Amino acid sequence: MTDPLPLACALLRCASVTPEDAGAQAVLDAALAGLGFTVTRLRYGRTENLFARIGSRPPHVCFAGHTDVVPAGPGWRHDPFAAVVEDGALYGRGACDMKGAIAAFVAASARHLAAGPPRGSISLLITGDEEGPATDGTIRVLEWMQARGQLPDCCIVGEPTSQATLGDTIKIGRRGSLNAVLTLRGVQGHVAYPHRAHNPIPPLLAVLHELSSLALDQGTDRFEPSCLQVTSVDVGNPAANVIPGMAQARLNIRFNDRHSGASLAQLLRDRVARHAPGAELEIAVSGEAFLTPPAFGGQLAASVARVVGRMPQLDTGGGTSDARFVARYCPVAEFGLVGTTMHRADECVQVAELTLLADIYAAMLQDLLP
């Protein structure tokens, strides 16, 4: 179990496209039970989740990740669920996002346990719902852990954070994400008789112009500026001589820690009310911005540097991940493989990098559980 390749291959052979598990978590269950972990399987809705822990004392270090993958799609040279090794690379959907990292979690834990019981505790929180709606996965397992006194002191999420070479980047935070749907209703009519209609497009354009012109902030030392983007404008009008009765727009805000989802929601409501008091505004916040405490991020960076010989960049860019849920409970950072092939045809990882990732996770355990 100290070699991550066999487990990575076994996981890749499970076609666990969200929301299907296809036996992936049973494979992981058997591997962890063989190392002495107490494994609990947790199913919410159609989602299979797993929590495994060895040790009962603090400090408690948790590895978090997901066994679900996106659909394979066309254009593969190899069967995406055959786990083919060719010219030193392991091919398969999920190889770098993120079944490879899960195998490295287990290999690192096996190496740590080979020296004897851990001085604290090691756990794994693995969901099958990260690539999907993320409603019945990590967020539910964390609630279960909290209710049973199983929350960790810190967490490492194995997302593929490295940019060009393994070990060059650790994610120490993420921006928040807000989605909004703005709907204006008018009165449909003939374009030749505008006085008999009410066109919702002009006030919608006025709202969108103001929102698109907003400078939400100038960024911070750790985060780039918050950004509002209009992603869709639609009136559903197939005719050239009809004033539409409805106009709708969708927008997204990726925001740093100068804002909260609630503060931005209120900003949107205020700006919309200026131009379209009767507009309908639906808002959903999928995650708040968070930043890892400097001490934890620095400790992980030192572990990486000890193995690869250079300090990683500490970054907060990119989209969202399940780390946004973990951040509500404990310090969390993300570190994993080079992500250049994730979600692409012929997704792959170099076998040497998979082994090196296990080395780095083992170094992290050594430093976090001295």
Image (cartoon, rainbow, N blue to C red):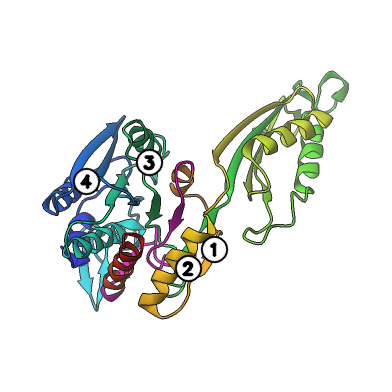
What is the three-letter code of the residue carrying label 3?
Thr
Tell me, for residue 315, which label it has, or none.
1
Give the Cα distance between marks 3 and 4.
Answer: 14 Å
The residue lying toward the viewer, choosing from 257 and 102, is 257
The percent position of residue 100, horizontal first and vertical second, equals: 29, 61
Neighbourhood count class around disc 4 (C-alpha, 10 Å): few under 14, some 14–19, many 20 upward = many
Q: As displayed, is residue 296 above or below residue 43?
A: below
User: Helix, strand or loop at disc 2?
Assistant: strand
- Check residue 3 for magenta coloring: no
Give the Cα distance between marks 3 and 1.
Answer: 22 Å
Q: Mark 4 points at which residue?
A: 25
The percent position of residue 13, horizontal first and vertical second, equals: 19, 55
Q: As displayed, is residue 190 above or below residue 51?
A: above
Give the Cα distance between marks 2 and 4.
Answer: 28 Å
Q: As displayed, is residue 14 above or below residue 87?
A: above
Label located before the other in sequence (2 or 4):
4
Q: Do the residues labelled 2 and 3 touch (CB within 8 Å)?
A: no
Q: Please name which of the two marks, 4 or 1, marks the residue nearer to the observer.
A: 1
Label located before the other in sequence (2 or 3):
3
Q: Name the residue under label 3.
A: 138
Q: Which residue lies furthest to the right in this view?
A: 195
- Residue 102, by quadrant, is bottom left
Neighbourhood count class around disc 2 (C-alpha, 10 Å): few under 14, some 14–19, many 20 upward = many
* Residue plotted at (33% across, 33% down): 144
Boundaries of the magenta span: 328-352
The percent position of residue 335, horizontal first and vertical second, equals: 41, 62
- Check residue 340 for magenta coloring: yes
Give the Cα distance between marks 2 and 3.
Answer: 23 Å
What is the three-letter code of the residue carrying label 2?
Thr
- 56 relative position to 182: left or right: left
Tell me, for residue 292, which label it has, or none.
none
